[in-house]
Every structure is written in structure tokens, then in C-alpha cells.
Amino acid sequence: MTSKNHVFIAIFSNHAEAETAIRKSQDFGLNIKKLSLLGKDYRQDEVVGRYRSNDHTRYWENLNSFSNEVWSKLSSVAFFHIPSMGPFLVGGPLASAIIGSLEGNSAVRGLSAIGSGLYILGITKSSIPKYEKAVKTGNYLVIVQGTEEQIAGFKAIVKMIGILEFDLHQV
């Protein structure tokens, strides 16, 4: 194994499986601050809009969807509604990357907000449509950043849970 940085993306068919993978990763000592969770808003009737970055809330109405144990432990949390994607929740470093992109700090020309965030994390432009499609069709992404050694434990966890698909990207 190598000590180079990697981004591991696991695609889950539902929110519960994705959250289970994140909860179990804590049992193996994986830093939850290096995890991102992305999926269509599974409780869209409860949230109007909110995002939190570095513990600073920019806008909020109803926090019920964000009271979940896993979501509250992620480094940043955001709710967005993009016409071509619909409503979605994102937490972790990916949320910070998307927020930065939307605020004009690092927008990537020709990519959606989600695509820009993934690109900022190190995902190639050619791989981004696959992940956007996965989210658009109701799947959830769990993204782990770290060395291959750090990711190995999480990879074993997600295989046990019932992952649809996964990829390892070297960045």
C-alpha cells in the first residue's frame, strides 16, 4: 500500500446503509471529519434550506433533517435544491467544497455545484457524471479522503453492508 492521498467513493442504494457505514467506521477509528455524505433529501418536507460551515450557520428554517446523529458529526452540512438535481443533503468536506464553489471561491467552469465539489476533492471530470447520476437516481454517496491504509478499513465495512459500487481515486 502507498501513503499517497486517495478519495474512496461508495455508492449506497439508501440513506440507512450509508449512515450505517459511517457509524461503523467510527468503531475502526476513522476520522469522521474526513467523510462526506451526499444524497437526495429523504425528508424534503422538513427543510427549507440551511448550510453550516465551520460551525457557522448561514441560513436555516427547520433543522429536523439535520438532527440525525451522523449528520451532526460531519464537519459541514448543507441542503441545496438544484433544478436539474432536485433537493439534496451533503455533509463533510464535500459540503465545504460545494459552498466554496457556489460562493465563487473555486467554481469549476462547466460543472454543476456537485461536480465542482467533487472536482475540488480530486475527482476527475470524466468520473463526475457517474456520481451525479447516482445521486439524481436516489442513491447516496459516502466519500472518504485519506491514504490507502486509512481507507482500507472503510472499504471492508462497506462491502459487508451491501454497497452498490465503489471507486478509489488517487489524488
Image (cartoon, rainbow, N blue to C red):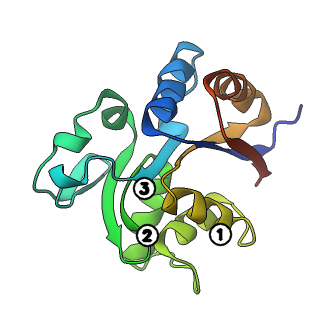
Residue 79 locus on image (x, y percent): 30, 58
- Residue at 74 percent across and 36 percent down: it is 147
In the picture as drawn, the residue positioned furthest to the top comes out as 27
Label 1: state its secondary structure: helix
In the picture as drawn, the residue positioned furthest to the right comes out as 1
In this rendering, the answer to whether 6 lies above or below 58 is above
| Nearer the camera: disc 3 or disc 1 | 1
Disc 2 + disc 1, Cβ < 8 Å: no
Left or right of residue 95, residue 7 in this image: right
Of the 4 image quadrants, the one containing the N terminus is top right
* Residue annotated with mark 1: 129
Residue 139 locus on image (x, y percent): 52, 49
**Label 1 amino acid?**
Pro
Residue 157 locus on image (x, y percent): 65, 22
* Residue annotated with mark 3: 95
Label 2: state its secondary structure: loop
Q: Characterize the local packing of mark 1: few (<14), some (14-19) or many (20 or more) Cα atoms within 10 angstroms.
A: some
Residue 13 locus on image (x, y percent): 55, 42
**Label 3 amino acid?**
Ala
In this rendering, the answer to whether 75 lies above or below 104 is above
* Residue annotated with mark 2: 85
- Residue at 65 percent across and 28 percent down: it is 158
Distance (Cα) linking label 3 and label 2: 16 Å
**Label 2 amino acid?**
Met
Q: Nearer the viewer, residue 120 or 142?
A: 142
Of the 4 image quadrants, the one containing the C terminus is bottom right
- Residue at 80 percent across and 51 percent down: it is 170
Tell me where residue 125 sits by quadrant. Answer: bottom right
Distance (Cα) linking label 3 and label 1: 18 Å
